[in-house]
Image: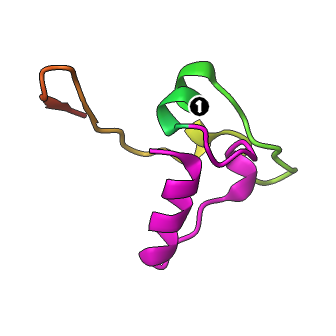
Amino acid sequence: MTVSSMITLAKQQGLAVPLMAVPNYGGLTLGGIMATAATGTGTAGSPSALCDIVTNIQWVDGKGDVHS
């Protein structure tokens, strides 16, 4: 899932993503951001990285098994 997709899905659910917690380019994948420890612009008192707001991760491996 990309940053743009996450923001769109959050809006559809009436939620918001702290924009300072994710990099500014919406085409990046969430997995790539987490794997490289990429950060957003961050400001004092706000989350400055995606890991600051992630509470759960589920992924599907190459065999189709779901992990969390």
* Image-based side of 41 in relation to 9, left or right: right
Residue at the far right in the pictured view: 44
Compared to 19, does 35 lie above or below?
Answer: above
Label 1 element class: helix
Relative image position of residue 61 (x, y in whole percent): 22, 23
Quadrant of res 60: top left
Q: Quadrant of the C terminus?
A: top left
Relative image position of residue 57 (x, y in whole percent): 35, 39
Residue at the far front in the pictured view: 27
Compared to 5, does 29 lie above or below?
Answer: above
Compared to 51, does 5 lie above or below?
Answer: below
What residue is disc 1 on? 33
Quadrant of res 67: top left
Applied colour scheme: rainbow
Relative image position of residue 20 (x, y in whole percent): 75, 52
Write the residue at 44% across / 76% down.
Answer: 12
Q: Which residues are magenta?
A: 1-28
Q: Was residue 10 drawn as part of the magenta stretch in this picture?
A: yes
Q: Quadrant of the N terminus?
A: top left
Relative image position of residue 49 (x, y in whole percent): 67, 39
Q: Was residue 12 drawn as part of the magenta stretch in this picture?
A: yes
Query: Between 63 and 35, which is closer to the camera in this rendering?
Result: 63
* Image-based side of 11 in relation to 36, left or right: left
Write the residue at 60% across / 61% down.
Answer: 17
